[in-house]
Image (tube, helix red, strand yellow):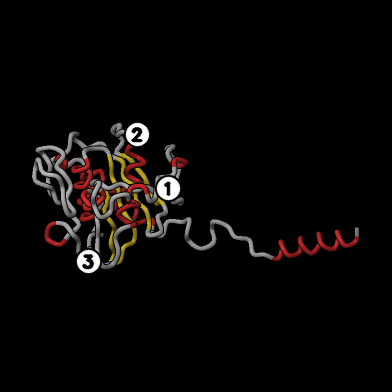
Amino acid sequence: MKIHNTFAISAFALLTAQPVISLADGDWHECGIPAATVSAVQAKLAIVIHLSDANGGSFKPNRMWSAIVDRKGNLCSVINSGNDPWPGSRAIAIAKAGTANDFSNSALALSTANLYAPTQPGGSLYGLNNSNPFNPHFDPQQTGIDSVPGGIITFGGGVALYDNGTVIGGLGVSGDSSCADHAIAYRMRHLAALDGIPGGVGPGGTDNIAYAPVGIAPTGFEQPHCFPSDITP
């Protein structure tokens, strides 16, 4: 009995001597982008969805969800435009933000629109969509902040956020055609002055959307057109 008691006491002492790790330790589960920056980016949604060209989309104003993640994938913010956007677009916006962040760096920016063609069957990145599935635990609204929901989306609407040439996170929007979604995200980032990318595979060495000719399958880093009203922001 004395041996068992001694072992139990020793084990208890060992456990209690270990440092207590909480979610507050470090910043893995806290947004790494300053709150003022997050708010400034999200404030641009209301401006962009009311532009006269409707971003080439179906709705005027556009009906959108907008999400921001930091460099580690933590969800910093997810908002909607307040005009009955599709509920399913919430998770898509989050996944687009994560995808743009995941596949951009200090040497190359890739928007989610740029990833369309290479992830199609036969493409060099086919299967990428299955690499990091969205965690359905974060499907309900009001969930996911300061967590890493994950998800991969490879059509327009996600762009990386750059501060002095460094990726600080990603912005994803959803709620219209993927072509309009791209235009909205691209314009929001520009208005927030977080578009100083190092280069890209899109038009002019940017991460802008590159449309495949109508009726021809996308190649390289192209995406198909959505509507005749599509724009290149």
Lower sequence index among marks 3 and 1: 1
Q: Which residue is mark 2?
A: 87
What separation in Å lies between label 3 and label 1 (alpha carbons)?
A: 27 Å
Q: Is residue 175 left or right of residue 76?
A: left
Lower sequence index among marks 2 and 1: 2
Tell me residue 168's x, y (percent).
Answer: 34, 61
What separation in Å lies between label 2 and label 3 (alpha carbons)?
A: 34 Å
Q: Amino acid at mark 3?
A: Pro
- Residue occupying image coordinates x 33% and y 42%: 92
Tell me residue 202's x, y (percent).
Answer: 16, 57
- Residue occupying image coordinates x 58% and y 57%: 22
Question: Please, what secondary structure does the residue beneath circle 2 have?
Answer: loop
Q: Which residue is mark 3?
A: 198
Q: Amino acid at mark 2?
A: Pro
- Residue occupying image coordinates x 20% and y 36%: 61
Q: Residue 166 or 118: which is nearer the viewer?
A: 118
Tell me residue 217's x, y (percent).
Answer: 14, 45
Q: Is residue 60 left or right of residue 137?
A: left
